[in-house]
């Protein structure tokens, strides 16, 4: 039996795509190898969002080159956003690569493997949703649901619209069937995935068109699904019904990821985000009013071209005002072919680094303060398995998407109540309540 090994870089959409790649390979008769050097088929699912994402991947590719030299029968494949962004250049720069494909062409890998191809092949048109391929879930009780692909936004820093194409929504009937199939297969938590989930449906034909909030209602109603999440929404499309859904739909979790990017309206304009700081804060207020205990998380970029100290101070102000439960922070990195990469007021690296340090300090301090509201409470935790640092303890996640390390006896996939005794900016600590576990 032939064996494959897949290394995944980048976002949750890529994790999803890799699971589908593995599902497809399994149905072709391949099995998964734990070690890259024991595999007949070495695959990389790449990301191109920032420069360091590219660099990380290229060092892995060096090892694939060595393994291919050892055994020329081995096949090396490169999929995902980086592959899409450099297209056929892959073969010129890395002649040992046999097949390269973009995010909309994963199914073509099967065609390549079944043919008698002698030359390198590249597949880069958008053709199909990875979500149509068989899945191979990393965890039995958690599943992705790819609701759309691509992005119609024109954020001036972002490479994704060029790697994943125009936005295309999947048919709601098809999505409902898939959610039901996942539930029947033991999935308790579903994460709806899209580059811009809350613009879901706008491209669907009139007869089947529904809004994102309707889709949330449909998935919530599926028997056996205890938790529904989604990522990522865009603040410009964050409608009141979606926020309300967090208060009314029992399985929709108390967590909203609302990417800020910058707290300065002039920078947001240069970023082409199409909202202002005021409009963003208005969404936050609506969340606080309708779902008071909701966790809010975000993405922030520092050092975007032209960002002054005053602009940056406004980002810090928003961080102080909102009190994010956590935030992903990024140093701006110019991406080939994007508008911002050609702007002439790029920020010097030491300035970016110094701002980043101040940003992280504020984010972590506020996150730690926010997390204290959980201390003394009993929280519902979906168990993921043994704790990473201490195998005598158990790890899981609350509905607010906080990681919890706790003492107890629960098994992966169970839903238990945990008494929270301490909180840092990143994790909660606690003890399982033994008598009132709420079943599994
Ligand atoms: N430089 C730095 N960060 C970026 N992001 C996207 N493009 C860039 C870039 N060129 C960040 C944004 C986005 C997250 C996934 O990555 O914050 O929300
Ligand atoms: Fe990376 Fe963006 Fe592609 Fe995800 S969509 S893999 S974050 S470039």
Image: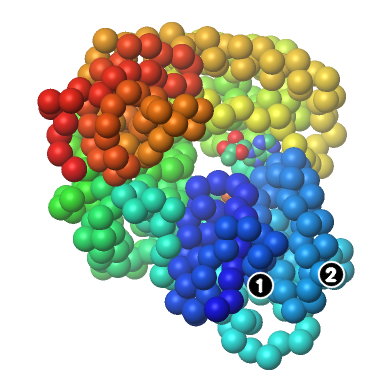
Point out the residue furthest to the front here. Answer: 392
**Total marks in image:** 2
On the picture, is 58 further left or further right than 420? right
Which quadrant is the C terminus positioned in? top left
The quadrant in which residue 204 appears is bottom left
CB-based contact (under 8 Å), mark 2 and mark 1: no
In the displayed structure, 213 sits above or below 72; it is above
Label 1 neighbourhood size at 10 Å, few (<14), some (14-19), many (20+)?
many
**How many angstroms separate mark 2 from mark 1 (CA)?**
13 Å
Point out the residue furthest to the bottom here. Answer: 116
SS category of the residue bearing label 2: helix
Q: Residue at x 38, y 18 (%)?
A: 429
What residue sits right under mark 2 in the picture?
69
| Labelled disc at residue 292 | none
The quadrant in which residue 281 appears is top left
Q: Is residue 88 visible?
A: no
What residue sits right under mark 1 in the picture?
40
Label 2 neighbourhood size at 10 Å, few (<14), some (14-19), many (20+)?
few
Of the two numbered discs 2 and 1 on the same chain, state the one appearing first in sequence: 1
Q: Residue at x 47, y 47 (%)?
A: 196
């Amino acid at each position: 039996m032939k064996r494959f090994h897949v290394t995944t870089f980048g976002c949750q959409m890529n994790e999803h795509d890799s699971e589908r790649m593995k599902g497809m390979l399994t149905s072709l008769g391949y099995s998964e190898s734990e070690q890259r050097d024991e595999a007949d088929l070495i695959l990389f699912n790449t990301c191109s969002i920032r420069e360091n994402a590219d660099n990380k991947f290229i060092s892995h590719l060096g090892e694939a080159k060595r393994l291919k030299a050892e055994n020329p029968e081995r096949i090396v494949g490169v999929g995902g956003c980086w592959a899409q962004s450099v297209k056929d250049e892959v073969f010129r720069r890395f002649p040992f690569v046999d097949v390269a494909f973009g995010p909309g062409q994963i199914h073509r890998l099967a065609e390549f493997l079944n043919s008698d191809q002698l030359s390198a092949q590249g597949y880069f048109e958008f053709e199909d949703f990875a979500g149509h391929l068989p899945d191979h879930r990393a965890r039995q009780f958690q599943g992705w649901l790819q609701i759309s692909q691509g992005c119609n936004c024109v954020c001036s820093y972002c490479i994704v619209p060029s790697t994943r194409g125009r936005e295309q929504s999947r048919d709601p009937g098809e999505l409902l069937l898939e959610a039901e199939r996942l539930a029947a297969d033991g999935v308790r938590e579903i994460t709806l995935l899209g580059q811009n989930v809350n613009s879901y449906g706008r491209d669907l034909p009139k007869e089947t068109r529904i809004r994102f909030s309707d889709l949330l209602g449909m998935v919530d109603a599926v028997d056996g699904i205890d938790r529904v999440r989604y990522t990522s929404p865009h603040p410009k499309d964050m409608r009141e019904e979606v926020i309300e859904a967090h208060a009314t739909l029992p399985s929709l979790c108390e967590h909203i990821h609302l990417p800020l990017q910058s707290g300065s309206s002039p920078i947001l304009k240069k970023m082409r985000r199409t909202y202002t700081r005021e409009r963003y804060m208005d969404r936050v207020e609506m969340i606080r009013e309708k779902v008071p205990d909701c966790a809010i998380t975000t993405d922030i970029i520092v050092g975007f071209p032209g960002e002054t100290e005053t602009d940056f101070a406004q980002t810090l102000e928003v961080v102080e005002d909102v009190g994010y439960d956590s935030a992903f922070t990024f140093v701006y990195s110019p991406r080939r072919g994007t508008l911002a990469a050609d702007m002439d007021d790029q920020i010097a690296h030491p300035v970016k680094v110094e701002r980043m340090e101040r940003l992280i300090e504020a984010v972590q301090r506020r996150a730690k303060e926010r997390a204290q509201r959980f201390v003394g409470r009993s929280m519902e935790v979906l168990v993921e398995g043994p704790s990473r640092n201490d195998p005598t303890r158990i790890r899981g996640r609350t509905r607010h998407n906080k990681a919890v390390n706790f003492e107890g006896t629960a098994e992966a996939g169970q839903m238990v109540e945990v008494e929270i005794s301490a909180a840092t900016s990143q994790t909660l600590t606690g003890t399982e309540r033994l008598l009132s576990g709420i079943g599994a």
